[in-house]
Image (cartoon, helix red, strand yellow):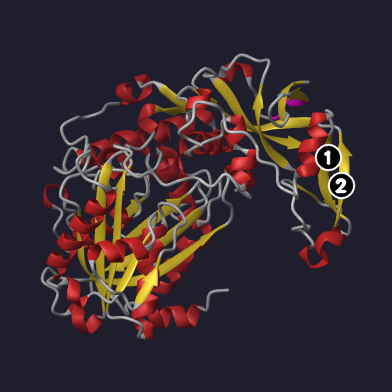
Amino acid sequence: MPNKQKLQNLSGQAHIVGVAESNKLGKVPEKSPLVHHSEAAINALDDAGLQFADVDALFTAGWSTLDVAEYLGIHPRYTDSTSVGGSSFVIHVAHALAAIAAGYCEVALITHGQSGRSDRAPIPRNPGTPMAQYEAPYGIIGPPISYAMAARRYMHEYGEDRTRQAMAEIAVSTRKWANMNPKAYFYDKPATFDDYHNSKWVAWPFHLLDCCLVTDAGAAIVITTPERARDAKNGSVAILGAGEGHDHSGISQMPNLTKAFGRHTGPQALEMAGITHSDLDLAMIYDSFTYTVLVSLENLGFCAPGEGPDLVASQRAAPGGDFPVNTNGGGLSYTHPGMYGIFTVVEAVRQLRGQAGQRQLDNCDLAVAHGTGGLLSSTGTVVLGVQ
Amino acid sequence: MTNTTSKPQPVSQPESDRYWAGLKNEEIWLQRSTTTGEFQFYPRNFSISEPENGSEGIEWVKVSGQAELFTYAIVHAAPHMGFVGEVPYITALVRLQEGVIIPTNIVGVDPEPEALCIGMLLKPVYEHSDVSQTLLKFTPA
């Protein structure tokens, strides 16, 4: 089991000093995934005031660090290709904290690049997995169907109308944030409750507007020691708490369909940071689906199971609301190339550094970024704060 | 696999050969721990409830296939070229009498939420194939 005392000592022992996206998000058929990796890396290092030569650790998912480091022309002394779905990059932040504190490296670079929209170099699937053997032959393939089955179970346990209303609230509030983010895919396109309810079925109970985008995009994060972070060009954000883990791969093996692994990683990350939920100013929650936000907030401990709909009722999560969630417009309305988790951290850092433009929160000193990967399989949670 | 127009087929493995062979004969064989009596799905070379006993710790048991609907989705957007002609279809997780949950399809009912009720009783339907494994689907009992 995680050692609470050691984790508390680790809190704050590394800082995020650079974050960035690749140069163009959305439909970008002219760029390969590696171009997104490299553009994001260049931009994030520039944001940090550092250079490629400073980087001594590389983290990525979906790709091997072998290929990404070679393409970038760097020779890392610490390498981590942990790939457990879209949560991986949040987990990389925690791994970088541990590696820097242990002395393995000083400047960690996390990169992501994926062309989900243009389908360039898709990630191959392994036909030898139990998921391929027992689920795929029945057409249980890809995230929407698996998440929809989990959401249907949630509806059974906590009420269908209540769940539906919460999912609609999340779709609409997230879109309002996207309408304030010039980089968002749906920046110019508002969405109403009617739009939500009238959108076509993808996999009942999911409407189209319950489902994330599929885009081409990349992002990168630069992390370093607290000492070197003092020289950061645009300010730094401390990594105060972290948790990671998983309890299944295929949806049919999920131990409890309405309780994902955030039930462990959320409380661990907050305890390590020495804070409670009410201390948090922003929740960046991987929104592969509206339902993912609902169940993640419960799993993280913001409320009891089944009470998530109250947390997002009456547009509380929208601009101007008292519980801001996914201020970048999320995977639902900003960008989602396939493994979105890194973008939750990018936005949390921007809000904490006061660089979120029109959508900047008034007081943002503590934020949680929470990634969910696979089929509600893995989670990674980090607490970030201004020090 | 995702680039072809045919449906993905189960590739049986040594630890699951008996499961798939059973379905060809319209029989459902599950593994049970010899010490805890706990059933498991999918088949493995050991019992996850009593791993220390290794392959000695499991036995195969033929079960009835009586089940109840645990959850489902109604698929309108085909996730794979092989299912384009199948939509809308019902994917489900069903709980067998023995306690295990298995992924499947519900057939013989309209693919509408009104036709489905969580907890509804189900019985097995065997979908045979000349070229591949038999699939285990379910229909209202």
Tell me, yes or no, whether the two marked residues, 2 and 1, touch with CB atoms within 8 Å: yes
Amino acid type at circle 1 is Trp
Task: Give the residue at x 88% y 39%.
Answer: B62
- Please tell me which of labels 2 and 1 falls first in the chain: 1
The one of A252 and A269 positioned closer to us in this rendering: A252
> Looking at the image, can residue A250 be seen?
yes
**Numbered tag placed on residue B29 in the rendering:** 1
User: What element does badge 2 sit on?
Assistant: strand
**Subunit of label 2:** B
Residue B2 image offset from top left, x and y in percent = 48, 35
Instruction: Provide the residue span drawn in magenta.
Output: B119-123
Residue A180 image offset from top left, x and y in percent = 16, 41
**Numbered tag placed on residue B60 in the rendering:** 2
In the picture, the quarter occupied by the N terminus of chain A is bottom right
Determine if marks 2 and 1 fall on one subunit: yes
Task: Give the residue at x 55% y 39%.
Answer: A150
Q: Label the magenta part by its dominant secondary structure.
A: strand
Neighbour tally class for label 2: few under 14, some 14-19, many 20 plus, Cα within 10 Å: some
* Residue A152 falls within the magenta-colored stretch: no
Image quadrant assignment for residue A69: bottom left
In the picture, the quarter occupied by the C terminus of chain A is bottom left
